[in-house]
Amino acid sequence: MTAGPARRRRGDGRRQGHGHAHGHGAATATGRHRGRLVVVLVLTLAVVGVQVAGGLVSGSLALLADAGHMLTDASGLAIALVAASLAARPATTARTYGMQRAEVLAALVNGLLLAGVGVTVVVEAVRRWDDPPQVAPGVMLAAAAVGAVANLVGLLLLRRGQRESLNLRGAYLEVLADLAGSVAVLVAGVVIAVTGYQRADALASLAIGVLVVPRAWSLLREVVDVLLESTPRGVDLDEVRTHIRRVPGVVDVHDLHAWTITSGVPVLSAHVVVDDACLAQNRCGEVLDALGSCLGEHFDTTHSTFQLEPVGHAAHEPAHHA
């Protein structure tokens, strides 16, 4: 991020400047990995078909549970792809950040679907415990093996992008849970084939549900943080404040805020108090450049807005945050 010297006089006498690295319509983290999402979506849908057929033929709840989970994954991936397209649309006067927040809303839907599947599987596994049906382990093992291989490929495709985007992280977590589910089904199939212990299928289903619910909660918690405009993880506002105060000409800073528009698009705003010499010598542009350079060097902030004020001006403003 760099801050330009542009500034303008407002009606109340305050000076305002801003800096940014790119326009609000720039590609988002999800958009940069759209091709990988498409490949994972196709793989997921193919495995769903195999597992549904295998579950119906074998009578395995665990296999059907894994198929239901993967179908939810496919829906989430489709939502993520649509959201990525919407987020790439340019900003307008009605939506000054475009539709980038659509990615976060898609992650919210994804998390809710994931939680619903997890709870449903747990309930059905408990219901089947007292009267476990007969399961054909051969078909169960074959279908689970296909799912495990496809999930492993999906994880490799999404591994890098999941560090950049909530949408991709949601998809990655779902595929990871799918892989664990497929392994659980494989283990249950082996147990049934070797010992004839039919409750192994219900145990595998329960394990899938237990794996899914915490991951859904983790994703939903991150989504809520973004929607509540919480300070981005890894950004220490006290440290940001310290860096701003070290800029020559800066006396103090208040109304300091940092939040996230969507994954990979953190923003920051602040009211910066400058000394009288800075205003008298018309060095506001230099201060803005220094602020932008400082934050760009030490913090991953895509867009920042600084309002420069004379000493004492804060007393004339409404109550502000520290």
Image (cartoon, helix red, strand yellow):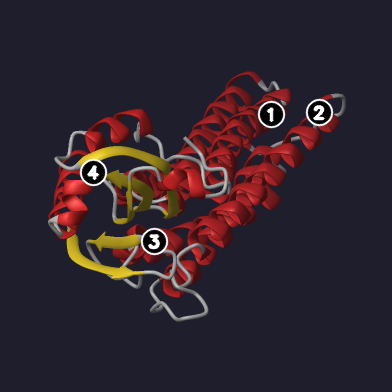
321 relative position to 24: left or right: right
Name the kind of residue labelled 2 in the image. Val
State how far apart marks 1 and 2 are (Cα): 8 Å
**Cβ–Cβ below 8 Å for labels 3 and 4?**
no
Which residue does the image show at 35% across and 29% down from the upper left?
238
Q: What is the x, y in percent for residue 143?
A: 53, 47
* Label 1 with label 2: CB-CB less than 8 Å: yes
Q: Given contact means CB atoms under 8 Å apart, are the residues at marks 1 and 3 in contact?
A: no
Q: Nearer the viewer, mark 1 or mark 3?
A: 3
Residue where numbered disc 4 is placed: 275
Residue highlighted by disc 2:
126
Measuring from the top left, give residue 17's x and y in whole percent.
Answer: 28, 62
For residue 149, above or below residue 245: below
Q: Position of residue 266 (x, y in %)?
A: 36, 51
Which of the labelled discs sits on residue 37, or is there none? 3
Q: Earlier in the sequence, mark 3 or mark 4?
A: 3
